[in-house]
Image (tube, rainbow, N blue to C red):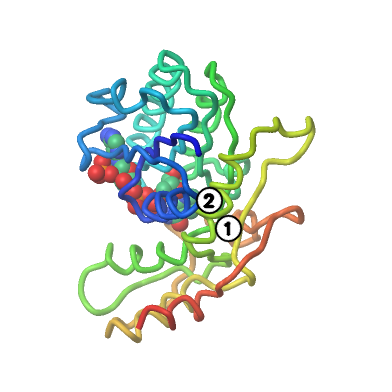
Amino acid sequence: MSRFAVAGATGRLGRHVVDVLTERGHEVVPVARATGVDIITGEGLTEALTGVEVIVDVASWHSSDQEAATEFFRTSAHNLQEAGRAAGVGRIAVASIIGVDKATAGFIAAKKVHEELLLSGPIPVRILRAAQFHEFVGQLLDWQQGDVAHVPALPTQLVACRTVAEALVDLATDQDAPTPGTPIPEIAGPRREILAEAARLLGTRRGVEVVPVDGSGIPDAEIAAEGGFLPGPHATLAGPTFREWLDTRS
Ligand SMILES: NC(=O)c1ccc[n+]([C@@H]2O[C@H](COP(=O)([O-])OP(=O)(O)OC[C@H]3O[C@@H](n4cnc5c(N)ncnc54)[C@H](OP(=O)(O)O)[C@@H]3O)[C@@H](O)[C@H]2O)c1
């Protein structure tokens, strides 16, 4: 049994990371402002990391604004590395996004900075890049007003947060350093989907009409349309599909 701090423990992904770690018999320190720990101001962070062996970083900025998200991840990476080093933390495992290496703008570009800054710190870092979450589709609908939602008809390979959490915990508990030259691991759902079609499945249940639109206006839409944010050949693909996942929730 090890002691893990989960930064972002109350989030969509974080709550599953907490569940998986707990089910596997580990001790979890939940880190979120809701639990009195702020990774940006540093409030409560030193105390929270006492005796912690591994930090799992699944904290996130709440909007897609690139500049604000970059500032959040720059500060969080610095604070987790510094407070973690002072506390004797042995490694950090972080959730990132498939395609960060191709992104030029928007939230995904901010995640590239997140990866780089975490990797530049003293504590060894393991990265897991995930596809968009099944849970992200609901967030997309929540962001739009009224009973009509405009959703880009872009390819994606949606994956369940629980599936990502299991893979991230596998990585976080792996004490062996990765073999040099090994690509950064990726996790995605079992099949390619069109984001607007997945949103329509959910919209039907919520009474929201989903209108597919092209990606113009969203960052790196051309790269997305060409499949730039789809998993690579080395990715782990794991269910449930979006439809199976939805069916378990109604
Ligand atoms: N959404 C996707 O489809 C997707 C896909 C691939 C990878 N990812 C990555 O997965 C990670 C988790 O995403 P998510 O969608 O699960 O995020 P989320 O639901 O927005 O959760 C964010 C978490 O961060 C915490 N947090 C925010 N500000 C904080 C602060 N100042 N101090 C401490 N905790 C703070 C929040 O808790 P409080 O508000 O209580 O502080 C919450 O627990 C992110 O790095 C994201 O980039 C997301």
Give coordinates of residue 70: x percent, y percent: 40, 33
Q: Looking at the rendered structure, which numbered label has been put on residue 220?
A: 2
Q: Disc 1 marks which amino acid?
A: Ala
Q: Is residue 169 left or right of residue 28?
A: right
Can the viewer see residue 226? yes
At label 2, counting other C-alpha atoms closer than 10 Å, the crowd grade (few under 14, some 14-19, many 20 or more) is some
- As measured in the structure, the alpha-carbon distance from the residue carrying label 1 to the one carrying label 2 is 6 Å
Question: From the viewer's perspective, is residue 117 above or below residue 137?
Answer: above
Q: Secondary structure at mark 2?
A: loop
How many numbered discs? 2
Residue under numbered circle 1: 224
At horizontal 46% and vertical 38% (from top left) the residue drawn is 56
Q: Residue at 46% across / 16% down in the picture? A: 85
On screen, residue 40 versus residue 158, left or right, reads: left
Where is residue 166 drawn, in percent x and y? 54, 55
Look at 59% across and 24% down and name the residue there: 124
Q: Amino acid at mark 2?
A: Asp
Choose top left, top right, bottom left or bottom right for residue 36. Answer: top left
Q: Which of the pair 219/98 is nearer the observer?
A: 98
Quadrant location of the C terminus? Answer: bottom left
